[in-house]
Amino acid sequence: MTKKTKDIQEHVKKETVIIVAVIMFATGFLSGVLLTAYKSSSGIPSEVAAPHQQQMPSERQGDVPEELAVKIFELEKQLAENPSDFDQWIILGNLYSDTNNYEKAIIAYKKYLEKNPKNVDALNNLGVMYRRSGRPDEAVSAFDTVLETHSSNERALFNKGVVLMHDLNDIEGAVKVWKKLVEINPDAISPGGMPVSDLIKRFNSVRP
């Protein structure tokens, strides 16, 4: 094989790699666009409303403000020495939630709920963490636990509807839950600013 032939083959290999890379990039980009369009076209926030949002210092130190990382470290140390200090578990859960450490937030909220099994804020936060960690059925269960004793809890009703709609593809179930919310509060507004009554009308119009 001549040097010229080898050079041509190497050039063809490089061009092939470039083409494959471009195709893979384009496919990924289009998938992202479609996903974004799908989520935003409904008019409903794809993220469940939550008071706490953002990752764990031990896992993503560079992304966490030093002050927050210190708070988490100190609270972890405190609870390691005194795990029965239940009021601190929900605080730690909120800090984990603020740093996007959903799995550790779940553990912390569940620990708090051992002592306070019907606490509405902890259960709602637990549901949000389940949803964000890709466990929609458990998220719905957490919101249902809230509604067992607080049937008019607006946050649990709206959040349950979001999970049913976006994660479980249960449009009918979501609309049914949101109707209950509007019965309780006709002026209920979604985190995106749209009246929940308008969301119901929109999805009623597209249902078969």
Image (spheres, rainbow, N blue to C red):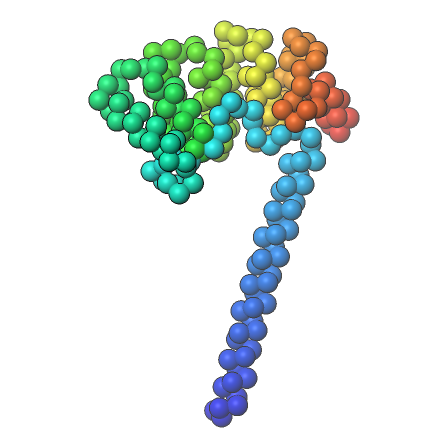
Above or below residue 19? Residue 76 is above
Q: Percent position (x, y) of residue 144?
A: 51, 15
Residue 200 visible in the shown view: no
Q: Residue at x 34, y 28 (%)?
A: 71
The quadrant where residue 24 appears = bottom right
Q: Relative to residue 128, is residue 25 drawn left or right?
A: right
Q: Quadrant of the C terminus?
A: top right
Q: Relative to residue 7, is residue 114 drawn left or right?
A: left
The quadrant where residue 109 appears = top left
Residue furthest to the left: 81
Q: Percent position (x, y) of residue 11?
A: 54, 79
Q: Percent position (x, y) of residue 203?
A: 72, 26
Q: Relative to residue 161, is residue 108 drawn left or right?
A: left
Residue furthest to the right: 205
Residue furthest to the front: 67
Work out whether residue 172 or residue 54 is closer to the camera in this orientation and state it. Answer: 54
Q: Residue at x 52, y 90 (%)?
A: 4
Q: Residue at x 61, y 52 (%)?
A: 29
Above or below residue 166? Residue 201 is above
Residue 192 visible in the shown view: yes
Q: Residue at x 65, y 12 (%)?
A: 180
Work out whether residue 126 or residue 53 is closer to the camera in this orientation and state it. Answer: 53
Work out whether residue 75 or residue 39 is closer to the camera in this orientation and state it. Answer: 75
Q: Relative to residue 104, is residue 202 drawn left or right?
A: right
The quadrant where residue 63 appears = top left
Q: How many marks?
A: 0
Q: Percent position (x, y) of residue 182?
A: 68, 13
